[in-house]
Amino acid sequence: MGIKLQNELTSLTIVEPCRRLLAGALILSVVSVNLVWANLVRADDETDRRATAVFDTIMSPYCPGVTLSACASTKATDLRNEVRQWLHDGVDEATIQSRLIETYGATILGVPEGGAAGRVGWLVPILATLGGLTFTALVLRGLVSKKSASGESPQMLTAVTGEVESAVSRELERRRQQLAK
């Protein structure tokens, strides 16, 4: 009986630390898997953020006048997936733009380039807007000066308005009398 008790005590002293060691290893592995998973999700979020930035600056070759992010074409979806894969593989945005320009041409860029042609792309709309505003200001200025030259004044306009108002009042009174009969 003494030997049996001693064997049980020995097995308990060995089993208990093994159980604790196993529980610790299990907890450590669960925590490690969670940390790895969180880093993978964070990396995917970063890839998606970078991909969205690329999609918003690239015009879709399949939907004219629409960025790649807004195009609903299945070919655009395929291109977006290809760009995501490039980003996942570590390709930087400048290289992706270069690849897309090689394949689809410079018109795929959503903004003008930085060279001389790109400056023209920015300057033309700005100059056209300034020219239109200047033209509008000159036309309005000419209209104001023509009214001043013709001798019209705000008082004359008020007098005309007063005459029209009294004529309308007389006509209304005449119509009311006709209806009352």
Image (cartoon, rainbow, N blue to C red):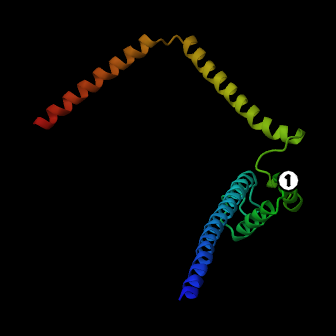
Please, is residue 140 above or below residue 124 in the view?
A: above
Q: Quadrant of residue 24?
A: bottom right
Residue under numbered circle 1: 106
Please, is residue 55 above or below residue 9 in the view?
A: above
35 sits left or right of 96 in the view: left
Mark count: 1
Q: Disc 1 residue type?
A: Ala
Q: Quadrant of residue 154?
A: top left
Question: 14 or 8, which is in the foreground?
Answer: 8
Indicate the position of residue 153 as horizontal and vertical percent values. Answer: 47, 11
Question: Residue farthest to the left?
Answer: 181
Q: Residues within 10 Å of mark 1 (few under 14, many from 20)?
A: some
Question: 2 or 123, which is in the foreground?
Answer: 2
Question: 151 or 142, which is in the foreground?
Answer: 142
Residue drawn at the location 69% of the way across and 54% of the way down: 49
Residue drawn at the location 34% of the way across and 22% of the way down: 164
Please, is residue 158 above or below residue 105 in the view?
A: above
Indicate the position of residue 70 as horizontal and vertical percent values. Answer: 66, 58
Indicate the position of residue 172 as horizontal and vertical percent values. Answer: 23, 30
Quadrant showing the C terminus:
top left
94 sits left or right of 75 in the view: right
Question: Residue farthest to the front?
Answer: 2
Please, is residue 126 above or below residue 77 in the view?
A: above
Indicate the position of residue 150 as horizontal and vertical percent values. Answer: 55, 13
108 sits left or right of 19 in the view: right
Question: 43 or 175, which is in the foreground?
Answer: 43
Task: Identify the secondary structure beneath mark 1.
Answer: helix
Q: Quadrant of residue 140?
A: top right
